[in-house]
Image (cartoon, grey):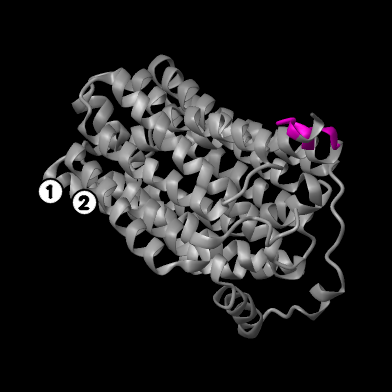
Amino acid sequence: MASLSPFLALKVSNYRNYLFGAFVSEIGNQMQTVAVAWQVYELTRNPVSLGLIGVANFLPIILFSLIGGLVADKVDRKKLLIFAQTAQLILAILLFTLTIYHFINPLMIYLILVLVATSQSFSIPARQSVLPHLVPKEYFMNAVSLNVLQFQGATMIGPAIAGFLIGGIGVQAVYFLNATSFLVFMASVFLIKVPLQKHESADVEFSLGSIMEGIKFVIKTPILYTTMILDFCATFFGTATILMPVFAKEVLHVGPEGLGLLYSGPAIGGVLAGLLISALHSKLKHQGKTIIYSLILYGVATIGFGLSKFFPISIFFLILVGFGDMVSTIIRNTIRQMVTPDHLRGRMASIMRIFFQGGPQLGDVEAGFLAKAIGGPASVVVGGLGVLLVLSLLTFKGRALREYQGKEVAL
């Protein structure tokens, strides 16, 4: 049946062009994430220094996300995307140059990460706001699924490539390829057709009042604020990504090649989740309960990873982590986009980013300091238990989430 095709949205060339460029760019971004973590840990051999990566990524989220969302609702989103990608290209070249000439140090890396995250504070709301315009409304959940699928595919491929490049050439090769990937994405953005915001955007002013309008919309929509809080808490406690170099070097003893595979593990599960939801998008009911069950899997699998001392078992649990996380993510993202008017999508996406990315970035800080105190494996186990505890509390209190079916929004 055509309605069950997992690739339905790819019939639309506008979406297809965008997805290809985003996929290539995300491969580069995921490669750089691995390279930065490896380089910082090589320079310091201190898990706290890995936690500081989370600080560098989180500060711009707090400082600039709401402003970036407002800008995305006011200006041409296509031009904003190109400008932000250009900035990130320059920063990738800077990392490459500093590494080649041996000028690099942790402080420089942290400062560059702050600038990268600042750029993303503008590009991510623009990306989220553009997506609903690339496909017909009835294809949208399928498009969200495929968008997550490309992200997870890139997260699976990118770290694996980075691991072998770091082992064979060095981190500088990763930074160079990441810079090249931004050129591909910019070319794809040039090709897509995105309508300018409707007349509502003319009423959007660069003011605190306009930012508060987005915040008030989220607050008065229970399914939005419930899923955002759940998103933040689950990723704050459950994230183990920043500790992967610790596991690769000191727990599993697998080196940079194994590190790349550890980073890829959750993405394999994410790809499976994306394929499943893409195929079942028109049949999926009881979406609120599906989010709850998927996050239970996420928490339990996180505990399993923390306890494992055997590399294949660790990969298996990471696959389950990614599967649970992505089932929940696809449904949450679809809900958020479809209940939000177009002239508020940028601001909604910026608020979502504070929760969606703020949780794991602060979780990285927590994991780094906790790992210093009690060790990496124990830190991850405590985080998995935290996910289950928070999920229990929010599920008990969050009636909007428990009862959400999916038919409340006409897809």
Q: Quadrant of residue 190?
A: top right
Residue 341 spot, x, y in % from top left: 74, 68
Along the viewing direction, whichever of 29 and 317 lies nearer the viewer = 317
Q: Which residue has dot 1 on it? A: 373
Q: Is residue 381 left or right of residue 232?
A: left
Q: Which mark is residue 369?
A: 2
Along the viewing direction, whichever of 165 and 280 lies nearer the viewer = 280
Residue 59 spot, x, y in % from top left: 42, 62
Secondary structure under the numbered disc 2 in the rendered image:
helix
Residue 179 spot, x, y in % from top left: 60, 35
In the rendered image, the residue lying farthest to the top is: 168
Query: What range of the chain is rendered magenta?
Result: 4-12
Amino acid type, callout 1: Ala
- Which residue is located at x 61 percent, y 61 percent? 349
Between the C-alphas of marks 1 and 2, the distance is 6 Å
Along the viewing direction, whichever of 48 and 150 lies nearer the viewer = 150
* Mark 1 neighbour density, 10 Å: few (under 14) some (14–19) many (20 or more): few
Q: Contact (CB < 8 A) between labels 1 and 2?
A: yes
Whether residue 105 appears in this view of the structure is no
Along the viewing direction, whichever of 42 and 227 lies nearer the viewer = 227
In the rendered image, the residue lying farthest to the bottom is: 209
Q: Which mark is residue 222?
A: none
Q: Is residue 159 left or right of residue 406?
A: left
In the rendered image, the residue lying farthest to the left is: 374
Amino acid type, callout 2: Phe
Secondary structure under the numbered disc 1 in the rendered image:
helix
Residue 252 spot, x, y in % from top left: 23, 22
Q: Is residue 63 left or right of residue 76?
A: left
